[in-house]
Image: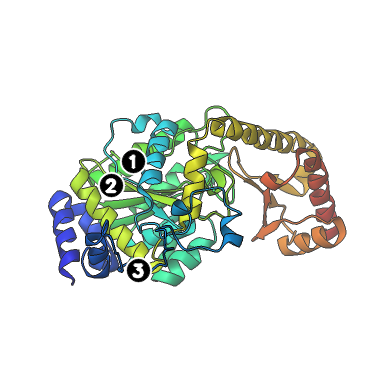
Amino acid sequence: MNPQAEALNNIIQEKNEAVFNLLSNRGKNIFFPKKGILGQSADAKGTKINATIGAAIEDDGTPMRLEVIASKVGLDPSVVFPYAPSFGRPDIRAKWKTMMVEKNPSLKDKELSLPIVTNALTHGISMAGYMFLNEGDEVIVPNLFWGNYNLTLVNAYGAKLTQFNLFKDGGFDLDAFKAKLEEGGIGKKVVILNFPNNPSGYTPTVEEQDAIVEIIRESAEKGNNIVTITDDAYFGLVFEEGIARESIFSALCNLHPNVLAVKVDGPTKEDYVWGFRVGFMTYGVKGGDAELYAALESKTAGAVRGNISNSANISQSLLLNAFNSETYNQEKDEKQEIMQTRYNAVKEALKDAKYADVFTPLPFNSGYFMCVQLAEGLDGEQVRQVLIEKYSIGLINLNNVLRIAFSAVAAEDVKEMFEGIYNACLDCK
């Protein structure tokens, strides 16, 4: 093992044995290199002649660039063309942490890591897998989950997804979650909590979220070491009263010394920048301090460097510019209102009693999606094909559950969409 990895491990083990035990073999071996090329480049920063950087520089000291590209970007070339750090730009890391606390007020005064920038949330989930999953480790997910977990965690790291039933009596199935967390005896537990959920579009109520947290607390008190990965891709897009407005990370990050909370989030859906590919990973654990978090940040940045080197500087710079804009909050509110209108149109359309003959809506209250469970005897793939060919409607079939991205449907088209689903189901009967 590299001495730099050993030094980080020693810090983590001294600060929190449970967190150290949660690290995968990769996580224990990874480090951010402070020697070698990176260290020598850092030493040379500020020199008159700096021939350490693997980039080209104009004679005037600015980044070398093509005008055909530079002319399309209204930002200083120094924040567009050079590499960003593997940790991410320090300014956007600090800004995102400030915004995270603003959006989750109960985080105030809680000790957290500084977010590490990832290449959006898929990469963040992958880096969490790198840090905490060995081959054969089980990851607890609901029976409605984002399919890319299979590629990101199962194919890449050899983990196993173990599922619990998501819904019971129109809400979150707390009993199923508790039973799944208790399976397999005392040891290491890895949980992904994705709210609003993809594909169902469900966020727990305040009471349900409190109960989930309590179940995790009780599990930790029994001696389990638990890493909770909160996939907050759709955070903030909540459309009903009584639904948890803060990320469950807010309660988990200071819950118990045996519970390491990992928040994976970003502007992809929150700020409608799907192609920018910027995300963040933030750590929180009860009793965590700056030294522990610095060690986890260094390991995570090392994993990023060994995987993609760093995330795009231009995307981080454009986002930081937007976050500091006077109109940012107003513009977000305007888009939120559009999403709310589409959600309301879905709720209104589903009041039509005839739909119950062919499908049943699953609980939903947030995010981009909602799902309908097809009636017995209907084949989801057949319905999907008829919808495309006869009604020019595209949906996703998930084992006879149809996922509907109402985020992409104008409110005026929602009723037509559900009429098409109804008629396609009748055609298939």
- Residue 168: image x %, image y %? 54, 43
Which label lies toward us, 1 or 3?
Answer: 3
Q: Based on the displayed image, in which of its 4 quarters is residue 42 positioned?
A: bottom left
- Considering the numbered disc 2 on the image, is that residue within a helix, a strand or a loop? strand
Tag on residue 136? none
CA separation in Å, label 2 and label 1? 7 Å
Name the side, left or right, on which 370 lies relative to 95. Answer: right
Picture residue at 75% right of the left edge, 57% below the top: 394
Give the residue drawn at x 57%, y 49%. 273
Q: Secondary structure at mark 1?
A: helix
Q: Which residue is mark 3?
A: 306
**Residue at 78% of width from left, 63% of height from top?**
385
Q: Which residue is mark 2?
A: 259
Please report contact status of discs 2 and 1: CB closer than 8 Å, yes or no: yes
Sooner in the amino-acid sequence: mark 2 or mark 1:
1
Q: Nearer the viewer, mark 3 or mark 2?
A: 3
| Residue at the disc numbered 1 | 252
